[in-house]
Image: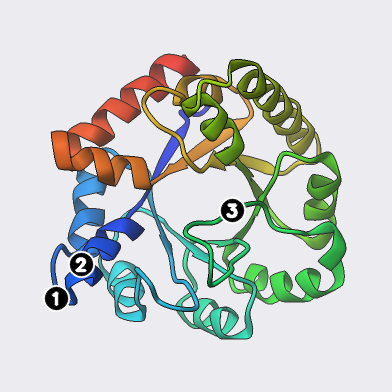
Amino acid sequence: MAMKQRLGVNIDHVATLRNARGGAYPDPVRAALMAEAAGADGITAHLREDRRHIRDADIEALMAELTTPLNFEMAATSEMHAIALRLKPHAVCIVPEKREECTTEGGLEVAADQSRLTDFIAPLAQAGCRVSLFVAADERQLEACARVGAAVVELHTGAYSDFHAEGHTLAATDELARITRCAAFADDLDLEVHAGHGLTFDNVAPIAALPQVAELNIGHFLIGEAVFMGLASAIAEMRRLMDDASA
């Protein structure tokens, strides 16, 4: 029997809302604990170089209080490497990062940076962290992920989500076919397959239906939807849609 597909809830944008006023609320750690109680299988938080949302104290508190795994998103910098090796979260997801971007715009360039990433990943894996690389659905990048020692790949679903939202049905279908092909390709490379970015109630089902996808990581939409229906209800509805699609 196949394992139930996991839902990781990204709580970054609770911190975005907090930081807009510079106060102490809403507390992203409280949101993470609520997400756990609502059925999240793990919590994702991205400590960016510029600390625009999640801050160092948030990561410390999450490590102390969570009972589900923390997926620590970070850029491949020496600063973040040191933090991850000190805290030893369950998972480390390496993502590309640019100061000027609003959100992560694309996948990590692994194929052209294999030597550095191999050296970067090895100590994290030795410390017990499951290392994931956030990449576009591209076979060349996936082959490189396997070579550099990643245990997991997270396929970037942003283009699929954007095409779907804009009503570009053919383009969305083409991108879904690419993700489908690459999920199977990554599985053949013995990489665990995750997916995320831009997923919503309206577009999640085809991704959740992919048998190789072990985990979806969803954040911004759920935090936004929580304004209207509450965080627990938003997570429960996403969980239902995932379960229905992957049944």
| Residue 239 visible here | yes
Q: What element carries label 1?
A: loop
Residue picked out by circle 3: 105
Q: What residue type is labelled 1?
A: Gly
Q: Residue at (82%, 67%) from the top-left corner?
A: 113
Q: Residue at (70%, 45%) from the top-left corner?
A: 136
Q: Is mark 3 on a helix, strand or loop?
A: loop
Residue picked out by circle 2: 18
As drawn, 209 above or below 29: above
Q: Residue at (66%, 72%) from the top-left corner?
A: 126
Q: Which of marks 3 and 2 is nearer the N terminus?
A: 2
Q: Earlier in the sequence, mark 1 or mark 2?
A: 2
As drawn, 232 above or below 148: above
Q: What residue type is labelled 2?
A: Arg
Relative placement, left or right, of 17 versus 55 is: left
x and y, in percent, of residue 178 in the image: 73, 28
How far apart are the two marked residues, 1 and 3, measured between alpha carbons? 28 Å
Kindly identify which numbered label has been placed on residue 23.
Answer: 1
How far apart are the two marked residues, 1 and 2, measured between alpha carbons? 6 Å
Q: Are marks 1 and 2 in contact (CB under 8 Å)?
A: yes
What colour scheme was applied to this rendering of the protein? rainbow
x and y, in percent, of residue 195 in the image: 56, 39
Which of the image's four quarters has the N terminus? top right
x and y, in percent, of residue 170 in the image: 65, 16
Q: Which of marks 1 and 3 is nearer the N terminus?
A: 1
x and y, in percent, of residue 60 in the image: 33, 77
Q: Residue at (29%, 71%) from the top-left corner?
A: 64
**Picture quarter containing residue 224?**
top left
Relative placement, left or right, of 57 versus 176 is: left
Q: Nearer the viewer, residue 85 or 217?
A: 217
